[in-house]
């Protein structure tokens, strides 16, 4: 199954500022965030550490999931991150 679209969460540090996004090329998007070439929230707050992501086959499904997560409260987002990444390590997007 080709799951090229990704919904992802970035953090500034452990339990820090969170950002949720969606992309068709996660490694490239992470490079852009890290280089600070994406103006706005992530650049302003230094949110660059990939702490959670999931892949989707369909872009519409990925966008729907992104919107769902953005509607969640912070505690739910933290529980989702910690369920798969309890130490808030920077994840490898190619995994």
Image (cartoon, rainbow, N blue to C red):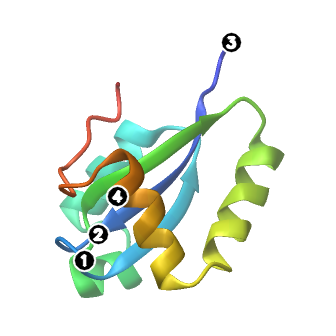
Compared across the picture, whether 28 is left or right of 62 comes to left
Of pointers 3 and 1, the one earlier in the residue sequence: 3
Name of the residue lying farthest toward the top: 1
Query: Which of pointers 4 and 2 indicates the residue nearer the eye?
Result: 4
The picture places residue 58, in percent across and down from the top left corner, at 78, 35
Q: Which residue is mark 4?
A: 82
Task: Please report the residue visible at 66 percent of the width from the left and 62 percent of the height from the top.
Answer: 66
| Above or below: residue 6 compared with residue 35 | above
Name of the residue lying farthest toward the right: 60
Which disc is residue 88 wearing? Answer: none
Q: Count the labels in the image.
A: 4
Task: Please report the residue visible at 24 percent of the width from the left and 80 percent of the height from the top.
Answer: 16
**Do the numbered discs 3 and 1 sit on residues whose CB atoms are within 8 Å?**
no
**Do the numbered discs 2 and 1 sit on residues whose CB atoms are within 8 Å?**
yes
Q: Which residue is mark 3?
A: 1
Compared across the picture, whether 88 is left or right of 94 comes to left
Q: Which residue is mark 1?
A: 15
Q: Which residue is mark 2?
A: 11
What is the CA distance from the residue labelled 3 to the residue labelled 4? 26 Å
Residue situated in front as seen by the camera: 80 or 90: 80
Q: Quadrant of residue 46?
A: bottom left
What is the CA distance from the residue labelled 2 to the residue labelled 1? 8 Å
Of pointers 3 and 2, the one earlier in the residue sequence: 3
| Above or below: residue 61 compared with residue 55 | below
Query: Which of pointers 3 and 4 indicates the residue nearer the eye?
Result: 4
Helix, strand or loop at label 2? It is strand
Query: Which of pointers 2 and 1 indicates the residue nearer the eye?
Result: 1
Task: Please report the residue visible at 57 percent of the width from the left and 84 percent of the height from the top.
Answer: 73
Compared across the picture, whether 51 is left or right of 89 comes to right
Residue situated in front as seen by the camera: 33 or 80: 80
């Amino acid at each position: 199954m080709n799951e090229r679209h990704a919904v992802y969460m970035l953090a500034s540090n452990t339990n820090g500022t969170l950002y949720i996004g969606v992309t068709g090329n996660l490694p490239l998007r992470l490079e852009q965030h890290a280089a600070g070439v994406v103006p706005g929230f992530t650049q302003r707050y230094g949110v660059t550490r990939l702490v959670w992501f999931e892949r989707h086959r369909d872009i519409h499904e990925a966008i729907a999931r992104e919107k769902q997560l953005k509607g969640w409260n912070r505690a739910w987002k933290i529980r989702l991150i910690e369920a798969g990444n309890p130490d808030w390590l920077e994840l490898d997007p190619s995994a």
